[in-house]
Image: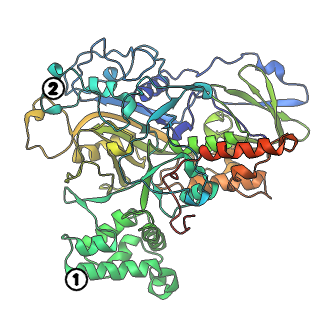
């Protein structure tokens, strides 16, 4: 079976993608203009035969709505300011405005940028490991691997900034122009744009989640590196506090009394084996997890920590079983790779779809970016899809067709009810909870305060994650939408951050981090849509959804495996690849033995001395 992938976008991953700062600006401009990504052939209807009918696909992506951009940093751009290492000069111009104003036009380029909008950047020194059992190994230190950039159509163009180190050290401006107290300006953000890898969707990986298991099994982890989340935070009584989650953290915590520590450890021990003691929770199955915690003689302090920072569920929307299951999942993932249950991929969440793309390409998969599909061709007699017609009017035949739901037209989705995800992406100057280390990676849950609203998940990334420039933090806010993204998330932003102003920069006593730049948008969540709600889809057309609002990636893995089993029911899902020495290529048997033996040292020399950064700790190293 040959796998062919067509995408009208110019980058991998769709709504799972990551962008540099300039790439994100181009993405914003694309969505604001709401224009077609490519020029399509207007006469595709002529390609349909008499015994066929066509299902037209959507020409534009309507999964992103209510986009609002705000720039709070001092906008000191000059004509000669460009992104370091860019292929050519960044022509984005910024109107000089008051630094306290939210100026959408100040953040968006007024001319079409030729910079790549994809963040397909990987460490140049990172090559596949030949040891599948050492496929996943967490890297908790600063990564210093050089990066090279993959451009469109898989043609690699070396970065012009190769002489720079890969540590997130900002390119210094002229010392005569350095602002006081090292404040970050919009000019510096533009200049350091390649230091940013900004995710459209913000998620973490549970250390024992389905995605980690899949990465280990398939050996796709050879293409990625990960860091452990260092802190789990809670927002209570108007302040941010660190939550003890491991046994060592609990007993070392000064926030809990000795009695509370014993109560917490007893309850967490029960959660790990709650299924073996049904008598202790069966009577409470009809109530919420929040109400159940009150029956367990836990103090309000402990109830808050367990509900919002371990189970990470809402007070009204989660049952007792859901809460116990979520708490067990949290505890089960502790200690596998670090002190918290979560991992984050270096260079952003968008690295993961690219990793699977690379593995697919190694085994013959074909990827065509900026190549749209205009319609599905359905055979009237069988009712099955037999081909597609692309933007050039070419007919491409296949037996199975997978379509992301954003490509389906309004007629096909007329009866579909979508949920929405509210997203905010912020650039700040310091952490929400300052400590001795400025390289903390944190997750914080802010509970909902009003009925009908949802808890907000905050993920704060430091420069060691390779997602932002040194001296700044990249903050992601996510919740299920009840209104527009700005209406849902701005109250939380106001609690945790303060907008940058010239007067505040002089005030050393300010407690909240300063907000330098912000983006709000709503993203479609189609993860719970039943396939039967789509109109007249042929049985061999399979629909996959975009990202959901959950913290982990379990839904995406389950959906991928379910679709795979429908198409290939007798095949193993993402099996481990064969060892290079076991692969027999056409014509190998015709080669003399001397040639085969001479190739072995060459293959061995390409094997890296160290394995990639994630391995299964349960498996012994060879």
Pointer 1 or 2: first along the chain: 2
Apparent side of residue 212 relative to residue 6 in the rendered image (left or right): left
- Residue shown at the point (47%, 81%) measured from the top left: 274
Residue 396: x %, y % from top left: 80, 30
| Front in this rendered view, residue 338 or 433 | 338
Q: Is residue 55 above or below residue 442?
A: above
Apparent side of residue 396 relative to residue 136 in the rendered image (left or right): right
Residue 66: x %, y % from top left: 42, 33
Task: Count residues near mark 2 (Cα–Cα under 10 Å), then give few for <14, some for 14-19, many for 20+.
Answer: few
Apparent side of residue 91 relative to residue 590 in the rendered image (left or right): left
Whether residue 239 is visible: yes
Q: Is residue 5 above or below residue 113?
A: below
| Front in this rendered view, residue 240 or 574 | 574
Whether residue 1 is visible: no
- Residue shown at the point (63%, 47%) measured from the top left: 604
> In which image quadrant can residue 48 be found?
top right
Disc 1 and disc 2: Cα gap in Å? 51 Å
* Residue pointed to by mark 2: 179
In this view, the residue farthest toward the top is 79
Question: Circle 1 — which element?
Answer: helix
| Front in this rendered view, residue 542 or 570 | 570
In which quadrant is the N terminus drawn? top right
* Disc nearest the viewer among 1 and 2: 2
Residue 92: x %, y % from top left: 37, 16
Task: Count residues near mark 1 (Cα–Cα under 10 Å), then give few for <14, some for 14-19, many for 20+.
Answer: few
* Residue pointed to by mark 1: 259
Residue 398: x %, y % from top left: 82, 37
């Amino acid at each position: 079976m040959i796998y062919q992938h067509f995408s009208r976008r110019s980058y991998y991953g769709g709504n799972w993608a990551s962008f540099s700062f300039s790439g994100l600006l181009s993405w914003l401009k694309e969505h604001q203009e709401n224009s077609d990504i490519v020029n399509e052939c207007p006469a595709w209807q002529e390609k349909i035969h008499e015994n066929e009918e066509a299902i037209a696909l959507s020409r534009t992506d309507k999964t992103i709505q209510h986009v609002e951009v705000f720039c709070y940093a001092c906008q000191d751009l000059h004509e000669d300011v460009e992104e370091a290492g860019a292929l050519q000069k960044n022509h984005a111009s910024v109107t000089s405005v008051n630094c306290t104003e939210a100026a959408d036009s100040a953040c968006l380029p007024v001319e079409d940028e030729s910079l790549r909008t994809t963040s397909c950047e990987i460490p140049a020194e990172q090559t596949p490991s030949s040891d599948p059992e050492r496929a996943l190994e967490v890297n908790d230190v600063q990564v210093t691997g050089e990066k090279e950039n993959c451009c469109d159509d898989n043609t690699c163009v070396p970065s012009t900034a190769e002489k720079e180190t890969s540590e997130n050290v900002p390119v210094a401006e002229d010392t005569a122009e350095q602002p006081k107290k090292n404040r970050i300006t919009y000019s510096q953000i533009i200049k350091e744009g390649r230091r940013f890898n900004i995710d459209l969707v913000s998620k973490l990986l549970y250390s024992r989640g389905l995605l980690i298991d899949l990465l280990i099994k398939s050996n796709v982890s050879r293409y990625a590196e990960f860091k452990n989340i260092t802190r789990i935070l809670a927002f209570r009584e108007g302040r941010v506090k660190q939550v003890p989650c491991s046994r060592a953290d609990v007993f070392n915590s000064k926030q809990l009394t000795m009695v509370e520590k014993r109560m917490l450890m007893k309850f967490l021990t029960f959660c790990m084996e709650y299924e073996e003691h049904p008598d202790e929770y069966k009577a409470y199955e009809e109530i919420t997890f929040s109400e159940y915690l009150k029956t367990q003689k836990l103090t309000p302090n402990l109830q808050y920590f367990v509900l919002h920072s371990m189970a990470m569920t809402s007070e009204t929307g989660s049952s007792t079983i859901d809460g116990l299951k979520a708490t067990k999942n949290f505890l089960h993932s502790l200690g596998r790779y670090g002190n918290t249950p979560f991992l984050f991929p270096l260079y952003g969440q968008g690295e993961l779809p690219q990793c699977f793309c690379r593995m697919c390409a190694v085994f013959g998969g074909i990827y065509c970016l900026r190549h749209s599909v205009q319609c599905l061709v359905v055979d009237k007699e069988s009712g099955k899809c037999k081909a597609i017609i692309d933007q050039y009017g070419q007919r491409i035949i296949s037996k199975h067709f997978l379509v992301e739901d954003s490509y389906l037209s309004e007629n096909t989705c007329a009866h579909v009810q979508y949920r929405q995800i509210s997203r905010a992406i912020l650039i700040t100057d310091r952490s929400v909870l300052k400590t001795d280390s400025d390289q903390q990676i944190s997750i914080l849950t802010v509970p909902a305060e009003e009925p009908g609203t949802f808890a907000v998940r905050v993920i704060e990334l430091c420069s060691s994650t390779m997602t932002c420039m040194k001296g700044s933090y990249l903050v992601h806010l996510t919740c299920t939408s009840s209104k527009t993204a700005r209406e849902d998330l701005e109250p939380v932003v106001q609690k945790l951050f303060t907008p940058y102003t010239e007067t505040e920069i002089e005030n050393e006593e300010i407690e909240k981090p300063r907000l330098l730049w912000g983006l709000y948008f709503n993203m479609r969540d189609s993860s719970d849509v039943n396939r039967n709600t789509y109109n007249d889809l042929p049985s061999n057309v399979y629909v996959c959804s975009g990202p959901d609002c959950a913290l982990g990636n379990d839904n995406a893995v389950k959906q991928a495996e379910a679709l795979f089993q429908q198409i290939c029911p007798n095949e193993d899902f993402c099996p481990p690849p064969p060892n290079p020495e076991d692969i027999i290529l056409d014509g190998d048997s015709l080669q003399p033995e001397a040639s085969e033996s001479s190739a072995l040292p060459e293959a061995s020399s390409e094997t890296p001395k160290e394995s990639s950064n994630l391995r299964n700790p349960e498996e012994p190293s060879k």
